[in-house]
């Protein structure tokens, strides 16, 4: 009987190589022309890094993904010559599971420690553990997780912020600092978004086993590490030098023995981008002061939690949550994750506020839709029992994309959501709402707007999402979400002139159902006599349109549309788009989809 193995080979991925490179190392001793290269024969874990390269400019962030090899001791080497499309394809097919798949390199692979990279020089294999069921859900996103923030002193520079400043920016008052005063930080915002289901806490104080290598003890969740590496050698070399020093200073074989997550805050000039993190991993890396901004902290930690980017027509463009752009802002913006990421994180399970609609199950929902700030939690002053997340589910085998819907309420800990505030947002993503998958914001609906998905789940039926009314003050939208015809079929969205006017003085107190029942679902009320929100007077619309961006975001009745660069009433229609030729500001032009700033004027892209 053959022995049973704990691993199975799931894929062998090949790059074009010369026949001579397939020879074994023993018969090819003279092949290493670079004296800094040596044979790499160790087994390692596959890690994919999500790199936010910048520059810091809304609408023009560049990014990249890299395949990496993590050794048993925590050193991480980048695998050279791995195309972005190849990485994305294997992540999407679940052939490559970052942080879980073993990376089997060919016998001819070489490592260059001076640049922190490995050349595979041949076929590369991924090996995954067998698992019962369809697919494993990797990220555990509840409980308490320890975090260590690393300040670095290197040859040619050091992290700008002190240990105390770093600890304050990540943990706030929880850092234990006597003068901690950072009100919005990684810990506080995640704690609020998750309703205390996930807490990032500072690593407890710990003394070095030796002081011969410089650095400091761990205090308030932060530490200083001294390395001989020069800033000019770059972040791939720097991160491995930090890892080695941490192991020596605290006598551990892997940094994960210290904390669940470790943030490397590198000296200025070490890297050219903003930050990056390893998907389903433990390390995140920041370009100096970017380590202190909560949107960056949450974005990179989201990658550690197996979250992918949030897009809208292009990468990072979904600004309704923190997996889009990052902001150079110390205490904000206060926002959480988009609908697809919120479903994946699982923080809002355990109530009846998550609904799945599909062709083979429940086919419609007509009623009030709220957002995550209205989660029915005992300590939430804004709680209600409305649905907060709705999933339009398709057959995974034939239609991998599903649709996630929420009311993006702009209040409380989500009060500074940059896009789609007080609108119904629709996000498309694969992965069944359980696994790593990029998402796309495909629609933001105001009152009296609809979005239709034709041939839903491969059928002749369309899925239609209609927003009938929005109540900003009560934080909900009246919606009709149906596959095919609603059952019972809803009436059309209320208009300013309903076909049958209700009586102005009903005999009974007006409720969600008018005194004379309409043909459709009783929750839909003609807009002439709304149960909660009334149609605003034109003066309200005018007052919003005159506000600048800051004033608009501070108003409870108005919403800022960044792609139109205009302020409008949150419960009203979206303002029209300016033509590219009418835009006179370079920043607005580059931010506006379909426009580009060239030769001192804004033109169509």
Image (tube, helix red, strand yellow):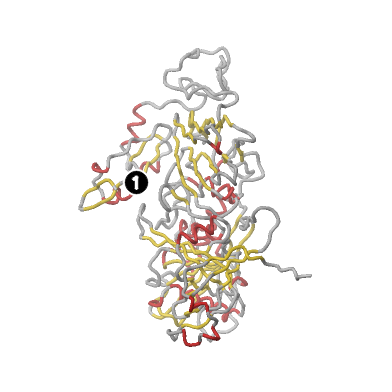
Please, what secondary structure does the residue beneath circle 1 have? Answer: loop
Q: Position of residue 326 (x, y in %)?
A: 43, 56
Residue at 54% across, 55% down: 92
Which quadrant of the figure contains the N terminus? bottom right
602 relative position to 485: left or right: left
Whether residue 364 is visible here, answered yes or no, is yes
Decide which of 577, 387 is in the foreground and name it: 577
Decide which of 550, 21 is in the foreground and name it: 21
Residue furthest to the right in view is: 1
Q: Position of residue 116 (x, y in %)?
A: 47, 76
293 relative position to 392: left or right: left
Q: Position of residue 366 (x, y in %)?
A: 57, 29
Decide which of 77, 495 is in the foreground and name it: 77
As drawn, 28 above or below 588: below
Q: How many marks?
A: 1
Q: Position of residue 538 (x, y in %)?
A: 35, 27
Whether residue 220 is visible here, answered yes or no, is no
Snapshot quadrant of residue 56: bottom left
As drawn, 309 above or below 105: above
Q: Which residue is mark 1?
A: 593
Tell me the crowding category of disc 1: few under 14, some 14 to 19, or many 20 or more residues within 10 angstroms, Cα based.
some
Residue furthest to the left in view is: 599
590 relative position to 288: left or right: left
As drawn, 101 above or below 562: below
């Amino acid at each position: 009987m053959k022995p049973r193995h704990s691993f199975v080979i799931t894929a062998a991925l090949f790059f074009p190589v010369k026949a001579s490179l397939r020879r074994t190392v023993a018969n090819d001793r003279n092949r290493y022309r670079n004296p800094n290269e040596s044979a790499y024969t160790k087994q390692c874990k596959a890690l994919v890094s999500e790199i936010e390269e910048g520059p810091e400019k809304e609408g023009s962030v560049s990014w990249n993904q890299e395949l990496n090899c993590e050794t048993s001791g925590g050193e991480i080497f980048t695998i050279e010559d791995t195309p972005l499309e190849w990485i994305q394809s294997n992540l999407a097919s679940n052939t490559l599971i970052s942080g879980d798949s073993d990376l089997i390199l060919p016998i001819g692979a070489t490592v260059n420690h001076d640049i922190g990279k490995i050349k595979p020089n041949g076929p590369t294999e991924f090996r995954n553990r067998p698992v019962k069921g369809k697919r494993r859900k990797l990220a555990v996103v509840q409980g308490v997780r320890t975090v260590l923030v690393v300040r670095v002193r290197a040859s040619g520079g050091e992290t700008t912020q002190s240990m105390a400043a770093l600890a304050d920016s990540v943990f706030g008052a929880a850092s234990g600092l006597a003068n901690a005063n950072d009100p919005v930080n990684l810990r506080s915002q995640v704690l609020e978004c998750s309703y205390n289901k996930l807490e990032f806490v500072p690593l407890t104080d710990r003394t070095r086993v030796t002081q011969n290598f410089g650095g400091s003890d761990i205090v308030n969740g932060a530490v200083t590490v001294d390395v001989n590496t020069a800033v000019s050698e770059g972040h791939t070399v720097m991160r491995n030098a930090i890892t080695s020093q941490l192991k020596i200073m605290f006598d551990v074989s892997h940094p994960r023995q210290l904390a669940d997550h470790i943030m490397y805050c590198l000296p200025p000039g070490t890297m050219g981008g903003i930050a990056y993190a390893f998907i389903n991993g433990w390390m995140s890396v920041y370009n100096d002061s970017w380590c202190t901004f909560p949107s960056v902290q949450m974005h990179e930690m989201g990658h550690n939690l197996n979250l992918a980017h949030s897009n809208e027509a292009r990468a990072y463009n979904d600004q309704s949550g923190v997996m889009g752009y990052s902001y150079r802002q110390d205490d904000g913006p206060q926002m959480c994750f988009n609908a697809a990421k919120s479903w994946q994180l699982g923080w809002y399970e355990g109530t009846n506020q998550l609904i799945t609609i599909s062709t083979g199950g429940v086919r419609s929902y007509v009623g009030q839709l709220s957002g995550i700030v209205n989660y029915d939690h005992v300590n939430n002053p804004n709680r209600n029992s409305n649905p907060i997340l709705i999933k339009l589910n398709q057959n995974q085998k034939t239609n991998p994309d599903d649709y996630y819907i929420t009311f993006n309420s702009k209040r409380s800990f989500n009060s500074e959501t940059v896009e789609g505030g007080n609108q119904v947002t629709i996000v498309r993503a694969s992965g069944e709402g359980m696994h790593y998958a990029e998402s796309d914001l495909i629609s933001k609906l105001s009152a009296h707007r609809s979005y239709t998905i034709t041939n839903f789940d491969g059928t002749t039926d369309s899925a239609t999402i209609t927003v009938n009314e929005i109540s900003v003050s009560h934080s909900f939208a009246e919606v009709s979400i149906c596959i095919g015809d609603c059952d019972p079929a809803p009436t059309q969205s209320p208009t300013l002139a309903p076909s049958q006017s209700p009586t102005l003085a009903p005999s009974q107190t007006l409720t969600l159902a008018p005194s004379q029942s309409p043909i459709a679902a009783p929750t839909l009320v003609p807009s002439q006599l709304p149960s909660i929100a009334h149609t605003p007077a034109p003066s309200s619309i005018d007052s919003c349109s005159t506000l600048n961006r800051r004033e608009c975001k501070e108003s409870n009745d108005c919403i800022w549309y960044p792609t139109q660069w205009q302020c409008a009433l949150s419960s009203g229609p979206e303002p029209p788009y300016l033509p590219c030729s009418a835009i006179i500001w370079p920043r607005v032009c580059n931010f506006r989809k379909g426009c580009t700033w060239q030769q001192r004027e804004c033109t169509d892209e």
